[in-house]
Image: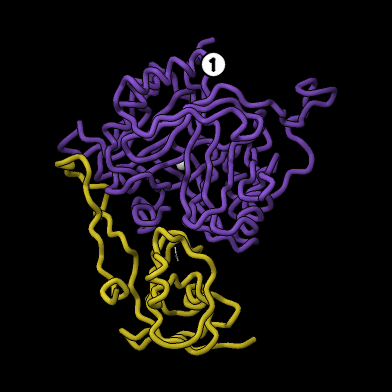
Chain colours: A yellow, B purple
Amino acid sequence: MQWFRVTIEETGETFECSKDDDLLSGMRNSLCRKIPIGCCNGGCGACRISVTSGEYRVRKMNRAVVSESEQASGCVLACRVYPQSDLQLKVLGRKWLLRSAASTQPATGGVVEAEQQQTEAERRN
Amino acid sequence: MALTGVLRPGHIVIRVLEMEPALNHYVNVLGLIETARDSDGKRVFLKGWDEHDHHSVVLREADEAGMDYFGWKVDSPATLKRLAGEISASGLCQDLEWVAAGDHPETGERFRFRIPTGHLMELYAQKTRVGNNCGTDGPDINPDPWPDGLKGIAPSRFDHALLYGDDLDGTVKLFTEVLGFSIAERVVPTDNPDFLIGAFLTCSNKAHDIAFIRQPVKGKLHHASFELGSWEKVLRAGDILSRTKTKIDIGPTRHGITRGETIYFFDPSGNRNEVFGGGYIYYPDKPTITWYDRALGPAIFYHDRELNEAFLTVFT
Ligand code: FES
Ligand SMILES: [Fe+2]
């Protein structure tokens, strides 16, 4: 089996990932916990990352959490990315930040807008 | 007939990113039974083994995960017409439309509407009965307790869903005042008991047929849930999920709300599923149970007594 080294830019943490494993599984099999873990299946967007260098292959991702243009600029879901070389990445996290709990404050205007986290990828667009 | 109007959850249409892994999950791991598929393979129709009607779960291949719509079976065509009129008159819903018979195989016409939390709902009165394959001398004659050939976890039925959305007040008003549901349990702030954070609604004798939690999003699916007979079967489900390397979210554990024994896990597109056992019988004269927000931990996960991060943030 072929193994590659994955480096998280912010902290310099690294883990090994085989070319047949997605990056999130590779991380979960190591001691690193830097990328947020959600559904592990490309649906929820918790594990969004920006790959800054290296080659990879992706599987289909929920378009509601990664748009085509984001994907083109390297923003992907770690649970849907398979390394083809050593990789460097930045952790973006989920797009939608919900209130910390189902809020105890009545919504003033009925609809409460989710805060949108501005991501690296979006800033570049 | 004492139980009239909206009878029960009839179907849920779940969007999946890739059909093949989704089918492996829903058929071989969860253990639903395929009853039909579109000629282009874009929709596959499934049911739990103890459901008599043609299908209760529809998988549709799409670019986004989540739920397309949730359908309710009503007691008669007359009730379907009446409720369609009352939904229109209520002014609470949008995107009202009739969907022609046959759009779902073996299913009559459906009335579709978008509820205030952004979810599409449907009512229908007719779906072909295909049976549960338990009869030993013809359908429903001298039946065995369960049929041969079940796979995987094999829940008896699609049971309920938990949905996230913003205008909880509007949705609860629709379900209680127009569709005839009762609030079995609710979550409110300690200092503001009129403000709903969560509502667990029933149209039947079940502890819930659908639930909503207020979140600043529209039309989101938290989980689709399937019924198992016992705690032991929930534990066995956990074994099957681990053996098949299915991502478990939490459990086996117990919910404070509904008292159900539960395990949450994810389908291959990140949609959360639940299988559960237990709970209680709801009658219309049963008092509504109230949970204060400070007790949301044990309300959701009775043993951990705190929410895991994923409960509030992971949905499709
Ligand atoms: S963990 Fe949900 S999309 Fe990767
Ligand atoms: Fe549930």
Residue A116 in percent (x, y) is at: 25, 61
- Image coordinates for residue B97, horizontal then vertical, percent: 44, 30
Which residue is rendered at x = 48% and y = 51% of the image? B272
Q: Which image quarter: residue B139? A: top right
Task: Check disc 1: other Cα within 10 Å, few if <14, some if 14-19, many if 20+.
Answer: some
- Identify the residue at horizontal 59%, vertical 50% (top origin): B235
Is there any visible trace of residue B236 in the rendered image? no
Q: Quadrant of the N terminus of chain A?
A: bottom right
- Decide which of B230, A76 is in the foreground and name it: A76
Q: Does B281 sit above or below residue B49?
A: above
Q: Which quadrant holds residue B36? A: top right
Residue where numbered disc 1 is placed: B77
- Which residue: 31% across, 45% down? B296
Query: On the rendered image, what quadrant is the C terminus of chain A found in?
Result: bottom left
Q: Is residue A14 above or below residue B306?
A: below
Counting the numbered discs, the total is 1
Picture coordinates of residue B145, whole percent (x, y): 73, 30
Residue B146 placement (x, y as % from top left)? 73, 34
Is ligand 2 closer than 8 angstroms to the Cβ of mark 1? no
Q: Secondary structure at mark 1?
A: helix
Q: Does residue B307 appear in the picture of this structure?
A: yes
Chain ID of residue with mark 1: B
- Under mark 1, the amino acid is Pro
